[in-house]
Image: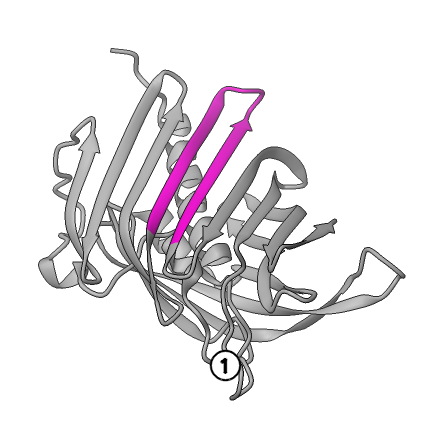
Amino acid sequence: MKRVSPVLAGLRKKLRLFSIVATSAGFGALALPAPPAAAQSTWPAGLKAEYEVGYNGFNVGSFVFKAEAEQQSYTLTGSANLSMLLGMISWSSDIRSFGSLVQQAPKPAVYAFDARSGSRAASTRVSFEAGSVATVAHSPQMPAKPDAVPVREQHLKGVVDPLSAMMLVTQGASPCDRRIPIFDGYERFDLVLSRKGETRLPEQAGGHSVVAQVCQVRYVPIAGHIPDGDTKFMASNGGIEVVMRPVPGARIYVPYQITIPMPLGSATLVSKRVEVTQGGRKTALLH
């Protein structure tokens, strides 16, 4: 069996932690602004967002997110490709989730995660019933890790998967100020978002600027994780931020930039293009 050096193994684990937090923090914060009393906000029929992944100022990959929503259901997909150290470390994943919308809140049905790193591949399938995890399947089946915090039955109630988290609708005027309970098939964790402030972003047309909301994000591990140095670093990381920008005419916020300090440097996701389809009209934002 081909052995993996501790350095490469550690970097791969950091990539996984980065992927979990980035996906859930950015798209878990995707939200509708609070509607007027006489109006009811609905999700756009389609959304596609393309992001560039950076590490210490270097481009190391890409992430593409797509969402389709009907009156009572949604389908979400994500695709990530990362490469570091001149290709010595490569990591790619495909994520899918679908479920129903009940009063604009997500009720996930199935979550699928497929990942590849070098010659290795792994997949995870999670099914949900009535807001709780019903089944979990991994391929290949991994032995239980004795140093991991056990996942109990109570941890699997009232949770969503990392992609369905994006459908959670804020009840306030800010896309921040929320706590999102997430289970990804391995770990049960919360993301706690709080409003940090505002920033102005250049608008693509006419030179006008747009006011974006800045959310601070806290990763709170609950179960399924190994309480080692990487997990403790991420849990105590006070520098995780997501900048949420409104899409004109679409009544929705989308992530513009996600920043995650890492043990050696900083990782970012920066929006390159966002397309929103609503009421037969397509809005495109280029950055």
Q: Residue at x 85, y 57 (%)?
A: 205
* Circle 1: element type: loop
Q: Quadrant of the N terminus?
A: top left
100 left or right of 194? left
Residue underneath mark 1: 172
Depth check: give the residue in front, 94 or 39.
39
- Above or below, 231 against 122 in this view is below
Q: Quadrant of residue 3?
A: top left
Residue 164 appears at what percent x and percent y? 37, 55
Q: In the visual, does 70 lie left or right of 232?
A: right
Give the overall secondary structure of the magenta segment: strand
Where residue 131 appears, as percent x and y from the top left, is: 22, 62
Asked if the stretch drawn in magenta spans residue 88, the answer is yes
Specify whether 150 is left or right of 279: left
Q: Quadrant of residue 195?
A: bottom right
Residue type marked 1: Gly
User: Is residue 270 visible from the viewing direction of this image?
Assistant: yes
Q: Where residue 11 appears, x then y in whole percent? A: 43, 33
Highlighted range, magenta = 74-98
Instruction: Name the residue at the top extreme.
Output: 1
Query: 28 or 220: nearer the eye?
Result: 28
Rendered residue at 55%/61% (across/down) = 241
Which residue is located at x 60 percent, y 60 percent?
279
- Magenta residue check for 79: yes
Is residue 267 visible in this depiction of the protein? no
Is 1 left, or right, of 47 in this rendering?
A: left
Question: Local crowd at mark 1 within 10 Å, few (<14), some, or many (≥20)?
Answer: few
Q: Position of residue 271 (x, y in %)?
A: 65, 48
Q: Is residue 253 above or below residue 188?
A: below
Q: Residue furthest bottom?
A: 37
54 and 248: which one is in front? 248
Quick one: which residue is furthest to the right in this view?
A: 206
